[in-house]
């Protein structure tokens, strides 16, 4: 496969794109874990979600 005279640019572009996508996936995974920790901490303190309240409860 010949990429022509712009082969270096094409390969570098794909490499940078792959790094950016990998960084975004890592960032999303880290944020997901942090949000799960925060929610777990709130649930341990007794804070519940509005959707889990009984019908007669008031905020």
Image (cartoon, grey):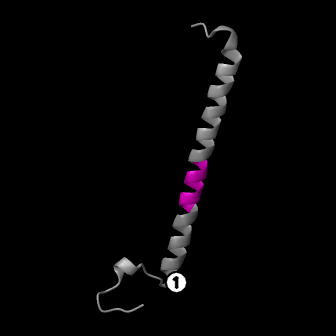
Residue 5 relative to residue 1: left or right:
right
Q: Position of residue 10 (x, y in %)?
A: 64, 20
Position in image of residue 15 (x %, y %): 65, 28
**Label 1 secondary element:** helix
As drawn, 15 above or below 45? above
Give the dominant element type of the magenta stretch: helix, strand or loop. helix
| Magenta-drawn stretch contains 27 | yes
> Which residue is rendered at x = 69% and y = 9% of the image?
5
Which residue, given by chain and number where applicable, does mark 1 sit on? Answer: 45
The magenta region covers 26-33
Q: Determine the residue located farthest toward the left in the rendered image.
A: 55
Residue name at image x 65 percent, y 21 percent: 11
Rendered view: 21 above or below 29: above
The N terminus sits in image quarter: top right
Name the residue: 35% across, 91% down.
Answer: 57
The spot of residue 2 in percent (x, y) is 60, 7
Q: Is residue 20 above or below residue 40?
A: above
> Which residue is found at the position 62% from the left and 33% from the top?
17
- Horizontal arrangement in the rendering, residue 59 relative to residue 42 (left or right): left
Q: Position of residue 49 (x, y in %)?
A: 42, 78
In which quadrant is the C terminus drawn?
bottom left
Q: Is residue 42 magenta?
A: no
Count all numbered tags in the image, as a single digit. 1
């Amino acid at each position: 496969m010949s990429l022509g005279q712009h082969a270096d640019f094409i390969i570098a572009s794909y490499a940078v794109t792959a790094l950016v996508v990998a960084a975004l996936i890592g960032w999303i995974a880290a944020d997901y874990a942090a949000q799960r920790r925060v929610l777990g901490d709130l649930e341990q303190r007794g804070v519940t979600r509005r959707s889990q309240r009984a019908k007669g409860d008031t905020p």
